[in-house]
């Protein structure tokens, strides 16, 4: 109770300055949250691409003209099929490549809730995809080597967290492959961890979430019968690594030979470095946050010292009645801690609004959070870092308040036993 009495009779007498201090803290907390959240996402993205950074890898940028592909289908489908087979043969020569693509599909099919229409991302991925993008399965089993050698008609798949209720572990269902236009039989082998994502190699602070995704393995038999449409979808971000990097000129010539498919390859490391160079140009926002922090800290330090000195008579009386400088420390810390909680309010609200937006079914599948998520992990960590900075500031102000009280009692010649 004595702490709140001190706050009421000393600090809250300067209500306008106290409110102004909270507003300064609020401005700093909001801008610092934005900067820190972005930085956390970039660091996590950089770490998430560790497997790609550990060796020489090249990524394909698909520059094919869809009209040329349509014309090739109409003019000479057999030649197109042979060209597709030749491209796949050039990739299979070493086998060191990653092929994957995604379709968004809305279909009616039987599931655990009955027959209903579900919108899902159907992602196809070959075995080497999981070398660079390992996926965490929380129920069931991952897609192991044996899965990619299977030839059966019932295909094991992994499903995202938002689809787990409709497609539980062990559930079997049929789905039309948009690339082939034919129905396939699937069974759920595993459920993915909530908010599992595939990190972008172009924007390290971005990822494609898999909460609404069905991950379908590209088995060896699938690769042997790949359609031109499927190959066209997979050429974007086609990864070449290992022995295939030495064959890259030949692979590139084969893909671009008839100009139906057109791909340029870029070093993944170069892509990452290009993003980091661009990201460093955002320093002005960080500088603004630092200026606001220093300005806020300076104002709060001045306000604390000024308040203690202007209330010296009130404080001296309370010290004579048993109040100790350490009590002033605790009272100041309680006030600043409460002010920090209020200052974090807009940042917390923004993080929660972003999470709710990303949970909206109208959002594209690649950005949808798991429905159980209150705040994104990156935003939660950013809020914790900003809260820690405000906590350090509160401790600093509390130490300054205690020190000012001790100096004031000495200056006025008051003999008081201090703790």
Image: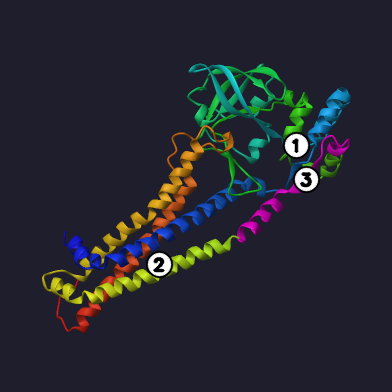
Q: Which quadrant holds residue 65? A: top right
Mark nearer the viewer, 1 or 2? 2
Name the foreground residue: 410 vs 26: 26
Precedes in sequence: disc 1 or disc 3: 1
Judge the density around disc 1: few (<14), some (14-19), many (≥20) Cα neighbours within 10 Å. Answer: many
Q: CA distance from mark 3 to mark 2?
A: 49 Å
| Quarter of the rendering containing residue 292 | bottom left
Magenta residue check for 260:
yes
Q: Is residue 4 above or below residue 189?
A: below
For label 2, the SS is: helix
Numbered disc total: 3
Is residue 85 something that shows in the picture?
A: no
Marking on residue 265: 3
Tell me how far mark 1 sits from mark 3, CA to CA: 10 Å
Mark sitting on residue 296: 2
Q: Position of residue 108 (x, y in %)?
A: 58, 18
Q: CA distance from mark 1 to mark 2?
A: 52 Å
Q: Is 167 located above or below residue 321 in the figure?
A: above
Q: Residues within 10 Å of mark 3 (few under 14, many from 20)?
A: some
Which residue has dot 1 on it?
235
Write the residue at 85% across / 44% down: 249
In-image side of 103 versus 82 (left or right): left
Q: Residue at x 35, y 64 (%)?
A: 20
Secondary structure under badge 3? Answer: strand
Q: Which residues are magenta?
A: 254-281
- Percent from the top left, x then y, of residue 330? 24, 63
């Amino acid at each position: 109770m004595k702490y709140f009495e001190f706050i009421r009779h000393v600090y809250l007498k300067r209500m306008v300055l106290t409110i102004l201090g909270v507003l300064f803290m609020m401005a700093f907390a909001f801008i610092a949250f934005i900067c820190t959240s972005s930085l956390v996402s970039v660091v996590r993205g950089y770490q998430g691409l560790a497997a790609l950074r550990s060796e020489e890898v090249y990524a394909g940028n698909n520059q094919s003209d869809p009209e040329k592909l349509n014309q090739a289908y109409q003019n000479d489908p057999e030649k197109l099929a042979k060209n597709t087979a030749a491209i796949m043969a050039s990739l299979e020569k070493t086998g060191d490549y990653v092929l994957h693509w995604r379709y968004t599909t809305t279909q009616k099919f039987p599931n655990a809730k009955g027959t209903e229409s579900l919108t899902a991302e159907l992602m196809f991925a070959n075995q080497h995809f999981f070398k660079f993008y390992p996926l965490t399965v929380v129920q069931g089993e991952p897609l192991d080597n044996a899965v990619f050698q299977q030839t059966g008609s019932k295909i094991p798949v992994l499903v995202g967290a938002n689809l787990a209720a409709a497609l539980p572990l062990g559930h079997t269902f049929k789905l039309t492959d948009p690339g082939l236009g034919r129905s396939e039989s699937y069974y759920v082998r595993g459920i993915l961890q909530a908010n599992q994502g595939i990190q972008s190699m172009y924007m390290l602070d971005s990822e494609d979430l898999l909460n609404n995704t069905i991950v379908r393995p590209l088995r060896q038999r699938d690769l042997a019968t790949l359609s031109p449409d499927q190959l066209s979808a997979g050429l974007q971000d086609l990864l070449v690594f290992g022995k295939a990097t030495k064959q890259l000129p030949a692979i590139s010539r084969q893909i671009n030979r008839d100009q139906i498919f057109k791909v340029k390859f870029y070093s993944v490391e170069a892509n990452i470095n290009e993003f980091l160079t661009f990201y460093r140009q955002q320093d002005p926002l960080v500088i603004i946050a630092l200026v606001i922090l220093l300005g806020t800290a300076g104002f709060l330090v001045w306000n604390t010292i000024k308040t203690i000195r202007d209330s010296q008579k009130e404080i001296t009386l309370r010290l004579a009645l048993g109040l100790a400088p350490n009590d002033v420390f605790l009272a100041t810390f309680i006030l600043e801690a409460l002010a920090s909680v209020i200052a974090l309010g807009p940042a917390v609200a923004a993080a929660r609004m972003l999470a709710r937006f990303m949970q909206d079914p109208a959002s594209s599948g690649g950005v949808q959070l798991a429905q159980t998520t209150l705040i994104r992990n990156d935003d939660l960590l950013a809020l914790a870092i900003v809260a820690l900075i405000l906590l350090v500031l509160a401790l600093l102000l509390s130490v300054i308040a205690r020190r000012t009280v001790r100096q004031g009692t000495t200056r006025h010649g008051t003999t008081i036993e201090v703790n």
